[in-house]
Every structure is written in structure tokens, then in C-alpha cells.
Amino acid sequence: MKTVAVKVVILGSQGVGKTSLVTRYETESFNRSTSSTIGASFSNVEVVIDDTKVKMQVWDTAGQERFRSMAPMYYRGANAALLVFDLTCYDTFTDVKSWAHELMSHVDGELMMVVVGNKTDLLEERVVGAAAATDYTASIGAYFFETSALDNTGVKEMFYAVAARMVQQSKSKKTNSALRVYSPDGKNDKQDDGASLRVIEVGEAQERGGSCSC
Ligand SMILES: Nc1nc2c(ncn2[C@@H]2O[C@H](COP(=O)(O)OP(=O)(O)OP(=O)(O)O)[C@@H](O)[C@H]2O)c(=O)[nH]1
Ligand SMILES: [Mg+2]
């Protein structure tokens, strides 16, 4: 089976549910009392699409403002970025726009951007409408998913969409992305251009203080 190795970064304000989305996908569980991420945490997520295994190195970054300056270390060389906001907190949607702007001006090469509106289960408290989110997402050529880490809505679909796009990119002759593609015989089909993956210090989680101000 062919293997494609990619780097995925998750960005977004504190408390929007970045860690919960990864945990939901990896362990099929949800924890109401999570700890706020410090620096970033790393995990491997694998998805098989037809005859290709997509190995995603997922960097779940900290949303706290004091870690914002570290973000470039994590998004540099990424193949995909999940920009997560909380559907019940408009400010976090505004923050996503600012992340998208930063990525567009600082990331070279092909970067798949996925805007993720999390916490669909909180229907009554929702303040960001689907139209506003889809209009914005279309305007920047990104993908849009609505998810709930709590009730497992859209989470698998979101990771599968990333994997499918990475497989598509790996087949495209035109791509200049830093995908690493391995053939079944173990030889690289395409060389890594050096921008893809790097080892970054991973911090410990700490108890959550205040999260979203909404
Ligand atoms: N109702 C609901 N709560 C959620 C959902 N996802 C996460 N939460 C809750 O939101 C809070 C923050 O979740 P985290 O996953 O830690 O958020 P984060 O974005 O990783 O936060 P930082 O690491 O501080 O940047 C926790 O209390 C979660 O239980 C969801 O889909 N629905
Ligand atoms: Mg977190």
C-alpha cells in the first residue's frame, strides 16, 4: 500500500475544542473537563483512502494568547491547517479569519485550509450562522466543516476530507507541496523538499483557567 506522510496543524482560540476533536477521533471519547494545551501536543492520525495510507502528524496548538508567537513553528511546512472556532462564540470566528490571513501571507507552497465550526450540539447558544461561515470559507478557497467533539458529528468526515485531498495532491504532477509519498516497495516516489516535518518541543497540559470570554 502506498503511504503519504503529511503535517497537519490545528489552530484556533482557547477553548474552541481543538484537543477534543483530536481526542474524539483518536480514542472515540469526549471529556468535559479537559486541560488547556501548553505549547502544542502531537499525535499520529492514520486514514486509509482506497489504496493509500495517509499518515498525518497532527500538531494541536495552544489557543492561549501567550503561545501565539510560537504558532509559526507549528504551521511552517504544514500541508493542511484546521482553523477551529466555537459556533457559540463570535470572537473565535473572527480569530479564525485572522489565522487564515496569517497563513495566506506566511506559508509558501500548497496549504489546504479547513475552517471548522465546533460545538454544533450547543444549538441554543449558536451565534455563528452557517451562511456566514460558508460565505467566508468560499471567499478564501477553504473547506468548511461543522463538528461536535461531544456527540461525534463531522469529526471523522473532517479528517477524511483532509486525507482525501492529500491523496489527490500526491497524485498531481503539478503540486509543489511537501508531501512525502512512499511506494509499496519502500522507495520514495517523490522527495521531501525539506519543509515538511520537524520535531518541536511538546509541552504538558495544564488545568484550564478561563477559556472563551463569550
Ligand atoms: N458542548 C461541547 N463542548 C465541547 C466540544 N468540544 C470541546 N468542548 C469543551 O470545550 C472545552 C475546551 O475544549 P478543548 O478541547 O480543551 O479546547 P482547546 O481548543 O484544545 O483549548 P486550548 O488547548 O486551551 O487552546 C472543554 O470543556 C471541552 O469539553 C463540543 O463539541 N461540544
Ligand atoms: Mg487544547
Image: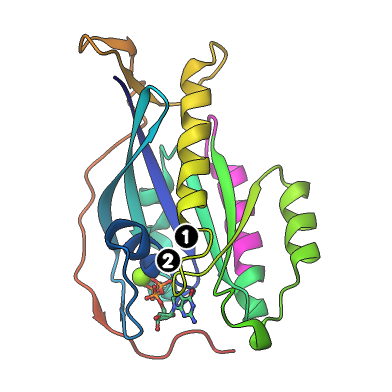
CB atoms of marks 1 and 2 within 8 Å? yes
Cβ of mark 2 under 8 Å from ligand 1: the answer is yes
Q: Position of residue 207 (x, y in %)?
A: 26, 86
Q: Position of residue 203 (x, y in %)?
A: 21, 66
Q: Is residue 140 above or below residue 28?
A: above
Q: Position of residue 77 (x, y in %)?
A: 41, 37
For badge 1, the amino acid type reads Leu
For badge 2, the amino acid type reads Lys
**Circle 2 — which element?**
helix
**What range is drawn magenta here?**
94-110
Q: Residue at x 54, y 43 (%)?
A: 106
Q: Quadrant of ligand 1?
A: bottom left
Q: Is residue 97 above or below residue 35?
A: above
Quadrant location, the N terminus: top left
**Circle 1 — which element?**
strand
Tag 1 residue: 11
